[in-house]
Each structure stands twice: as structure tokens, then as C-alpha cells.
Image (tube, coloured by chain):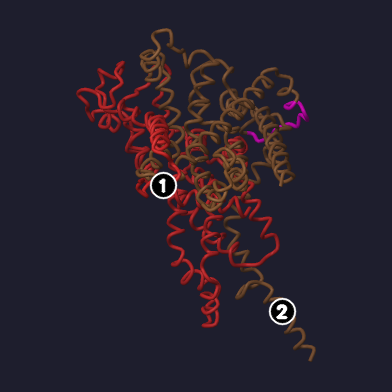
Chain colours: A red, B brown
Amino acid sequence: MKSNKFNRTDSLGKTILIYVVLAIACVCSVYPILNILSISLRPADALFTKSLSIIPPNATFDNFRQAFIQYDMLGWLFHSLVVSSAACAFSVMLSVTAGYAFSRFEFRGKKTGLTLILVTQMFPLAMTLLPLYLMIINLKMTNSYIALAIIYVSTSIPFNIWMMKGFYDTIPKSLEESAYVDGASVFRSFYQIILPLAKPAVALTALFSFMGAWSEYLVASVIINEAGKLTLPVGLVSMQGQFSTAWGIYSAGALITAVPVMILFVCLSKYLVGGLTVGSVKG
Amino acid sequence: MKDTVVKLKKKKRNSSFGIGQGRFTPFFFLAPAAIVLAFVVAYPLIYEIIISFKNVTLLNLKSQNYPWIGLDNYINVLADSLFYSTLIRTILWTAINVFFHVSIGLFLAILLNRKLPGKAFIRILLILPWAVPQYIAAMTWKGMYNVEYGSINIILTKLFGDAALIPWLSVPSWTFLACIITNIWLGIPFMMMISLGGLTSIPEELYEAAELDGASGFQQFKNITLPLLKPILTPAIILGTVWTFNMVNVVYIITSGSASDESQILITMVFKRAFQYFRYGQSAALSVIIFLILLAFSTVFIKAQKSDD
């Protein structure tokens, strides 16, 4: 007699085997992250050790302190916060409106537009980084957070527009129709009726664009090079010195950067995949 | 009379738009996003094609006076034997990565797609690599590949003795393998979550019916799971391929510091040509070539998939 917690068809042996395989996979997927944790807790004189224990003997938070003392961690955090918030705000404004147009209005080139937006996902930023860089030099915008934020916006809105469109599609049209009957304009009914209803989707767009900007290294490394203006990713990778890397402090910084994003990401991953599959099935 | 006809016509045209929609309403809603996309995505792409025919170097970078040199950049790129070895390495890189992403991702998804206590927790652990910012993952793995103190070599020597010490970061072919392992680790969660999303949408009854008919597990997988996952997996595979083909972060960070070009892929070559050797024109030409390769790949792949149906 098997409990109905398990699949009906799985024998006991099979279930055990599944757990073993999954356990191995979990160890592989989590180990590198634990490795960062372990290094960040090591005292400076025991950085290079051959022990594999996750919590090292005489663990210390000294590296976390040193990240703020020896390096400009606070400045990097602040700069990244500025860039990511700007990117997030722009991205929300643009995708909320564009998604609405794609969901509600009929106009020529609507299908083409939606497909084109998907196609932009096919060509990652790395490919157009050079022309963007030349453009930025010509506009004298090197080291400009605005330039960086706008580039991040362009990477996040395609996905966000699709997600917003998907969400608007679930809101019945009759809501706006009754607003029109009462004499509201298109803009007013969008702003006062639909947008408040779409709050969850707006929150998701905001979070995804924030996290995308927060974790991007390549573009930032090309655009930002003035020592006092580094953002988190550029600063962290710059710890990798020519001859030696301050691994302890780097790991502490990496944890400070990554843990909040990781927690958010795990909480939101359900919606992320939902958005991706909706986009691909319909597109 | 005529007036009313015109009015009626106008009304009719209006109602062929969405309700409450004027002629330019969609324009107002779309313009901001369209402008940004045009400036940051479309224009650079065109600009890139233009500068790939020009001689852009560090010397004339600021003057904006780039002389036309026709196909010289392309000839330079294509005459270099390094291009072909890198192309082959890139194809190898993409094929190996995508193969493992899809096969392991799908495998884990199938294991998870059943009643299993603790499933939610296991799933969180398994998607963690996706949540780590890529550059942090690359840096961390680079630390783990350290010859003496990296945990990978420590584990290997504990398991297999001192002979298993691998010079990950100093021998190009090992570095390449190191990049592949890192990128496989990074890419599995995406494919796993996509497959899991697809699997949960397949009705249980299909498998029950197949079982009644005596179909084996593998037959069920081949005849039910795969065909029904196809519409979801195909776009994911195309996207995955393009992303892997253009994965700069991992390769660039892990190979930075090594002088050899023997573990580069095409996109890091683009990046290095532009931002380390300052050969902007050549770099642009190389990007255009990559663009054409990817375009060809996705057209052929989509066509092949369509003719299958």
C-alpha cells in the first residue's frame, strides 16, 4: 500500500533512484554558490587552503567589512542602484504603454511589430556593442549612467512588452467600454482603470528590468571606466588583478550583490517562465 | 444626405479600430518604446554594417571621419586562419552546450514532473545557477579552476590521486573545457524550467492510456512527451543556441589573463578585436558575419521544423 504522496506508477526502487539523482544534481548546482560563501568567510591568512569544508574554521565576517574599507563597495552599490532604478523606471513606462497598444488597439503592422520585438531577442547586445560604443563616443556620453540605463532599457522591454500584453489580454475589454460610455478618454481609462488592475504585471516588469540591469557586466565594462564611477559588476570584476585576486573580499562582494537578486529571482521564476512560454507559443 | 453617408463611413472606419481608439492613439502608446528600440537596437545594427566597410581605428575614432575601404575588413577577417579555427570551436561550443542544456534540463524536468515530497525545495535548488549574475558565476568558477587552491582540483586529487591535477587555466584546451562546464551549469535551469512548464501542460490521461496499451516508458517519452513538447522546446532551443553562440561573459572572464587565442569563440574575438586591439572595422565585419551565420541557422532550423509537422 503506497501513500498517495507519490506517483502511482513509481516503484519504491525507482523513487529512491530519482531522489539520488536529484540529490546529485542539487549538489552540483549549489556547490559553486556555497564555494563563494566558504571563501568569503575565510580569514585573510587562511585564504589559500586545501580544505573543502563549507564553513571554515575560525570563520569571520572580516572580508565583508574589508569590502567597504579597502574598496569603494558603498559607491559601487549606490551607482548600480541609480542605474538599475533608472533603467527600471524607463522600462516600466515604455513597456506598460506599448503592451497596452498591442493588446487593445488595431493598427497596421501590429503582427509584424510583435514579431520584430521577438526577433530583437535573437541578437544579444554583445553584437551591437561596438556601434553603440562608437555612438556613445560621438555623443560624448562615456561614463554616463543615462546612456547605460537606456541601453539596459532596450534589452528589457521586448520581454516586458510581451508580458504586459499577455496580462492585458486577460482583462476584459468591457471595463474600458463602460468607461468610454461614461465619457472617459482612452488615456484616462488606461491610466485610471486598466493600470491599477495590471499592478501585479507592472511589479514583475519592474523587478525583471531592475535585476537585468543589476547583473549586467559587459556593457557596463565598456561604457564605464572612470575609477570613481564604477558600477558593481565592473568594480567586482576589477578586483581580479593582474597577478593576484583578492578572492576573500571579492567573494564577500559577490554575495552582497548576488544574494538579494537570487532571492527575488527564485520567488519570481514561475512568472518568468510563464512569460517566456506564452511568448514562444503565440509567436 | 451626402453628409450622413460621409458620417456613416467615418463611423464605420472608426469602428474598425478598437473601441474608443482614434487614428493616432496607438501611435502615442507605441512611440516611446519604438523610439528607444530604433535608437538602441535598429540603428546600431545598420551602423555596424556601415562601419564594417570603413576603416575605423583608434587614430580616427574621435574625428568621425572614417574612410571607405570596401571589403578590406572582410578580406582581412576571412584570410585569417584564426577565423576558421575559431568558427569550428564556436560551433563545437554551441553544439555541446545546447545538447547538454536540453538533455539534462529535460531529464531533470521529467524527474520533477511527478508527485514527490520536497519537490518545490529541490526545484529552487536546481534553478539557483540561473539566478546568479553571469559574471559572478564566471568569476567564481574561475576561482574554482585554480590549479593549486581551486576546489575542483582539490576534489579531483582527493578522488583520483595527484595525477588528476588539471591545469585548467593555463592549457587552452582545458580552458575551453572549463568554459563549457561553466556554461552548461549556467544554462541547465532555463531549459529545465521551460520543459517543466511544457510537461505540466500535457494531460495525465495520455500516459494512462498509453500504459493501458502497454507502451514502455521510452515509447511514451518518444511518442507523447517529445511531440507535445516540441512547440515549446523549438523556440527555446533556437534562443538557447543564439545565446550560447554569443555568450561573451563566461568565455571572456574565464580566459582573461591567458595570452592564447586557442580557447576563444567568435563573439569574444569580436569583443577583443574592438576593445583590446582597437580594430573597430574588422570587429564590425566579424559581427556582420556572425549575424549572417545566426540568421541562416534560425531560418534553416525553423523551416526544418515546419516541414516536419
Indicate the position of residue A244 as horizontal and vertical percent values.
38, 18
- Tell me whether marks 1 and 2 sit on the same chain: yes
CA neighbours of label 1 inside 10 A, class few (<14), some (14 to 19), many (20+): some
Judged from the image, the secondary structure of the residue bearing numbered disc 2 is: helix
Name the side, left or right, on which B37 lies relative to B250: right
Q: Main secondary structure of the magenta part?
A: loop
Residue B156 image offset from top left, x and y in percent: 40, 16
Look at discs 1 and 2 and give the one toward the viewer: 1
Q: Which residue is nearer to you in this view: A117 or B51?
A: A117
Q: Is residue B244 above or below residue A208?
A: above
| Foreground of the two, B59 or A278 | A278
Q: Is residue B253 magenta?
A: no
User: Is residue A58 rendered to the left or right of residue A255?
Assistant: left
Seen in the image, is A135 located left or right of residue A26? right
Q: Which residues are magenta?
A: B63-74
Which labelled disc corresponds to residue B115?
Answer: 1
Distance from disc 1 to disc 2, alpha carbons, whole Å, reads 55 Å
Horizontal side of B78 relative to B173 (left or right) equals right
Q: Which residue is farthest left?
A: A58
Label 2 amino acid? Answer: Lys
Quadrant of image for the N terminus of chain B:
bottom right
- Is A248 in front, or is A270? A270
Q: Residue B27 in the image: state x and y as whole percent.
A: 63, 64
